[in-house]
Structures are given as structure tokens and as C-alpha cells.
Image: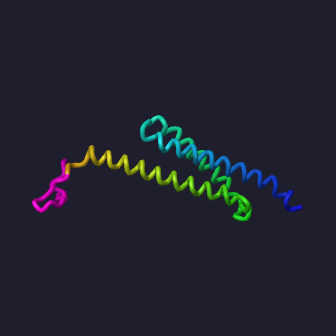
Amino acid sequence: MKTCENRPMNKKIDKLLDDLIRKLEEEKELLITTVKDSKQVEKLNMVIEEKRQILSDLSKFSAKDFKGFEEKLNQIKNLSQINLTLAAGNAQFIEEIFSTIFDEPQKYDQSGTVKQPQKGFFNKKI
């Protein structure tokens, strides 16, 4: 009798997990293309918001409700890790571009080490 009661809940969890996997895959593709096409940022933001809503819906279930979905949960974990790595790589790439464009060139002393710029109150532009 208990399996019949849980069946609609299992279907709902299954559908939410499938939706989350699709959103994570979409997010991965957008993280890759966003670097070369800034128009993709809005799509990425929408996907992140949709993913957040799915996670909110999933949070309403207890941990025991996810028994039997271990394979999907592992897939979600792997995709999330890939997306986190891609996002961190994108952030580092952008940071490097900005530092190349906007930072002062590094100056070396006679021993070959990088001189630290002297920044103080009197060195700042007003």
C-alpha cells in the first residue's frame, strides 16, 4: 500500500530531477558560449533562476524520498562540479583580461624580482 502512495511523489521527484539535469546541461553549454557571446548572459541568468526554482521544489522533500534516484543524483553532482569549474575558469579568464588591460605593467628590479608598486596616500590621484 505504501508504494502506491509514494508513486506519485516518486514521479514528481523523478520529473524534477530530470528537469534539473536538463537545466544543468543547458547551463554548461551557456557557460561555454557566454565567454564569446555576451548575448548569452541573459539566457544563462534565466537558466540559473529556473534551476534555483527546481532546487527549491526539491528541497521540500526529505532525504529518504530520494532513495532509488542515486544515479540521477550522481549525475547532478557531476554536472554541478563541471559547471562550477567552468564558471570559475570564466571568472579567472575575465580577471586576467582586466588585469592585463587596466593594471600597470610589472617592473623588475636588478635581481629579476617583481617590484611591488608603492601605493600610499600621496601616490593616489585626486
Q: How is the rendered protein coloured?
A: rainbow
Query: What residue is rendered at 31% in x and 46% in y?
Result: 98
Give coordinates of residue 67: x percent, y percent.
73, 62
Counting from the top left corner in percent of width and height, residue 60 is at: 69, 57
| Residue 111 image position (x, y, % from top left) | 12, 62
Residue drawn at 53 percent across, 56 percent down: 81
Please tell me which residue is depicted at 20% across the width and 49% down the height of the picture: 105
Q: How many marks?
A: 0
Q: 122 and 73: which one is in front?
A: 73
Farthest bottom residue in view: 64
Outermost residue, left side:
110
The answer to whether 71 is drawn above or below residue 105 in the figure is below
Does any portion of residue 120 appear in the rendered image? no
Left or right relative to 42: residue 57: right
Q: Is residue 4 magenta?
A: no
For the question of whether residue 95 can be seen, the reply is yes
* Magenta part, dominant SS: loop
Give the answer, above or below, for where 110 lies relative to 86: below
Q: Which residues are magenta?
A: 106-126
Residue 21 coordinates in the image, percent (x, y): 63, 49
Q: In this picture, is 64 found above or below 31?
A: below
Residue found at x 64% / y 58%: 73
Q: Quadrant of the N terminus?
A: bottom right
Report if residue 117 lies within the magenta region: yes
